[in-house]
Each structure stands twice: as structure tokens, then as C-alpha cells.
Amino acid sequence: MRDLALLPKAHLHLHFTGSMRVSTLAELADAAGVRLPAALLDGDPLRVPANERGWFRFQRLYDAARSVVRSEETMRRIVAEAAADDAAEGSGRLEIQVDPTSYAPYVGGLTPALEIVLDAARRASAATGIEVAVIVASSRMRHPLEARTLARLAARHAGTGPGEVVGFGLSNDERRGETAEFAPAFAIARRAGLASVPHGGELLGPAHVEDVLGHLRPDRLGHGVRSAEDPRVLDRVVSEGVALEVCPASNVSLGVYPEANHVPLRTLVEAGATVALGADDPLLFGSRLVHQYETARDVLGFSDADVAELARGSINASRASGGTKQTLLAGVDAWLAPA
Ligand SMILES: [Zn+2]
């Protein structure tokens, strides 16, 4: 059995607060005198009966975690630890997703909030040897005009390397807000050369995937797993070259699928989709990046060659430079080569 932690890969779906270690959250809450829901600290926050899972429980726990992130120092620590954890799992390229809006009040505004994350990403890259780039995520819960403000801010820091903004996202409850109203923000981001990486096709099905494809022209779709429910939509995803950031633990924790063996990873791959596995919110879903690859191999029956192909998909779908991609892809070949 090859060690999946040694398989070179890129991590394209990880949220800033959701990346936090449980131990860090506990320490921060203690220091701030904040009492967190016990569910956040018991190591398995969403492990409840399927009929009690779901978005609202997730959102409440996420908000509680976010409430302890109130300083520049904490923000820097989160990025540094996310990078260290990714490095330990064979990730050579992390594109971490942050909505600076929630942290702006504590650090003097949106611009400093983003600049802190970018600087922390640069430093984390130097410290760990992996590239840490940033995706600015707007939120469906806020006014689309705020998304435009964020897109303009993201555009000013556009690039491909460590500590630069590589993409623009749209996160939070997929059932809220009008997708079409966020199109102008994505147009701003696209003009600046940023990847379009909205969420879609997890809490809603193929019809919403088509909405997102039509209005936001994604390069990658956060989740997109439910494209599998309509072969025509899945064909469109494939023919438009949209990569899917698939996060099996998230799907199961949110009750989208009852168990990991229902995640339609095989259907997506067999249709020709490029897939990049991601952990989404390890703090809440209780598992990090390598676990998603373990799910593919141990639960869904992917061979080592198949998981190597998933790793290649993640690398190719990243916004890393050609040189970085080549290095990581060569590492995948070496991992797969007979010992
Ligand atoms: Zn997500």
C-alpha cells in the first residue's frame, strides 16, 4: 500500500476558519473567555444522526468558531497551521479560501484583513516549502454589491504565486441569494485574470449547476458533485473544462449523501471530469486532506493509479505556474512507479 500522505497533490478547497485545528480553537476560546458549543471540541462535531445533519447546524458551529478569530495574530496563526498541516499531507500547493469581511472589524478594514492573510501565506510558503495562494470568497448571504467590492480588492492582488490572490469564489448556503446577481462581481475578477471558483452543486442539484455555469463561468466548481444526477449537465461540466472540487467528508457531514460510499466520485471521473479532492472545513467535518484520498481508495475502490490521477487533476486544476505543476506531476509519477 502506497502512503497517500506522500502522494504529491494540490489542495484547492479549504476555508480559512474551517481549516483550524480543534486544539487551536479550544486554546483561542479559552483565552478569549468564550464558551464554545461542546460539539465543536469533541472532535466529531457533525457526527449526528443523518436526519439531524445539515446546513443550519453547520452554520451555527462555524459562526461560533469564527467568533474567536479577532486579531491579526490569530489570523496569521490559522494560515501558518493550515500550511503546515497541508505540507504534512503531501500538498505542494494550497489555495486557501477566505472571506475577509468577517475579520475586517478587528484589524482595521477589508484591505488590511486580506493583506494579513496574503502576507501570512507568503511567510507560510517560505516556512513550509509548499506554495500557499489565496482565493477571495464572497458570500451569498450578503448583498451582491459587497461581492463587487471584494472582487475589486481581490483584483488588486491578482497573481499566481505564494501570497497572491489566484481566484474569486462564492460561498455559504447555496440556497440563498440569486446566482445571477453575482455575475458582475465575477466579471470584475475574470478581467483581472482570477479563476472563477464558486460553490455549486452540493446543497442544490444539476439545475443550479447550470445556473452557476451560465452566470459565473467557473473554472472550477466548489463541489459540483450533484452534476452526477443529470448526465447532460455532467457532460456540459466536462466539455466546458470545469474542474470539480470534491469534498466527500463535507458531503456526508452535511447529509447530502448518507455515507461516503454514496459520493458519486466514480461517476464524475468516468464521465471525464477533472476532480480535485478537498477537505473543505476540517474543523467541522473532522478530517483533513489525506482522508479524502483514503475515502477514494478504501471506500470507493479507487486503485493507486486512480488516486494518482485524482492528484494529477488537483495539480492541473490549480493556478500554480507551469514549473510548479511539472514538479508536482513528476512527484506523482515517482509515487506511482514500482518500488
Ligand atoms: Zn466550501
Image (cartoon, rainbow, N blue to C red):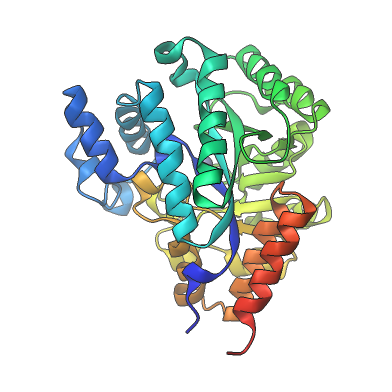
Residue 141 visible in the current orientation: no
Q: Position of residue 305 (x, y in %)?
A: 63, 79
Q: Position of residue 17 (x, y in %)?
A: 41, 35
Q: Position of residue 154 (x, y in %)?
A: 67, 24
Q: Nearer the viewer, residue 193 or 74?
A: 74
Residue 136 lies left or right of residue 54; in this view the side is right
User: Residue at the location (79% across, 54% down)?
Assistant: 322
In the rendered image, the quadrant that contains the C terminus is: bottom right
Q: Nearer the viewer, residue 176 or 285?
A: 285
Vertical order, 93 against 18 (above or below): below
Residue 191 lies left or right of residue 23; in this view the side is right
Vertical order, 2 against 209 (above or below): below
Quarter of the figure with residue 77: top left
Q: In this view, which residue lies farthest toward the front? A: 126
User: Residue at the location (57% across, 80% down)?
Assistant: 304
Quarter of the figure with residue 232: bottom right
User: Residue at the location (51% across, 70% down)?
Assistant: 6
Q: Position of residue 33 (x, y in %)?
A: 16, 23
Total count of labels: 0
User: Residue at the location (65% across, 14% down)?
Assistant: 149
Q: In this view, which residue lies farthest toward the bottom? A: 339
Residue 149 visible in the current orientation: yes
